[in-house]
Image: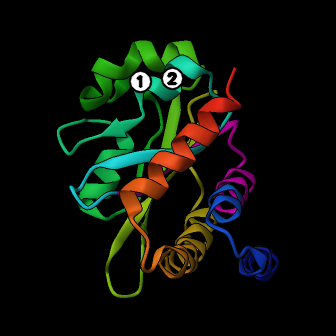
Amino acid sequence: MMSAMISRLRAETALDGTVGRVLDDVIALLGAEFGDLQLALPDRSLMLVTQNGFARPFLLGMRKLTAEASTVCVRAFLSQKPTTVPDVHTDRPFSKYLDIAQKAGFKAVHSQPLTADANDPVGVVSALFANPHSPTGVELHMLDEYSRFAADHLVGLLRGKDVNAEAERLFLSMLDGAP
């Protein structure tokens, strides 16, 4: 399974296709109903660039998150460690986002930092679940291996580009197709 995921990812040569491929693979690997991927910007914020399963209000509300946000993805980004919240209703730091979670239809989140081999933070990919959920140890191990490869692939595609401009372009493109 891992070799097939990496082969599909290697075949992606454009940033748009790559972020979509990474998200699709993570959702499939973890069996999630929803997901999103954010790129790290130079100001240490996260910009939403692709998603699966969310409507326009969610996307607009989560467009750009700063280090002050207490979302699961920001916590994973800041710690550079995978972060799982098996039930958002019991996670105190997430409490101010419960209304957003309820409207979007998710109850659990796993956020995986995308960190390149040079320890450069590239972004975060998150799998969101309709019911309380925790990924298994095997899933987390596979995701850790895959996310390192994905981060390096993204670094190569972003080399020499303005990350802010690319993230904004991807966000607007994603928003155009959102209900």
Q: Is residue 169 above or below residue 116?
A: above
Please name the residue shown 54% across and 71% down the image: 147
**SS at badge 1:** helix
> Farthest residue toward the bottom?
118
Q: Closest to the observer: 50 or 169?
A: 169
Q: Closest to the observer: 17 or 147?
A: 17
Asked whether the residues under the numbered discs 1 and 2 touch, taking CB atoms below 8 Å apart as contact, a structural biologist would say: yes
Rendered location of residue 121, percent (x, y): 34, 69
Where is mark 2, residue-wise? 58
Q: Magenta segment: does it hold 36?
A: yes
The quarter of the picture where residue 149 lies is: bottom right
Where is mark 1, residue-wise? 61
Residue flagged by tag 1: what amino acid is it? Gly
The quadrant of the picture occupied by the N terminus is bottom right
Q: Magenta segment: does it hold 174?
A: no
Please name the residue shown 41% across and 87% down the image: 117
Q: In this view, does 94 lie to the left or right of 123?
A: left
**SS at badge 2:** helix
Please name the residue shown 25% across and 35% down the image: 70
Q: Give the range drawn in magenta.
A: 21-40
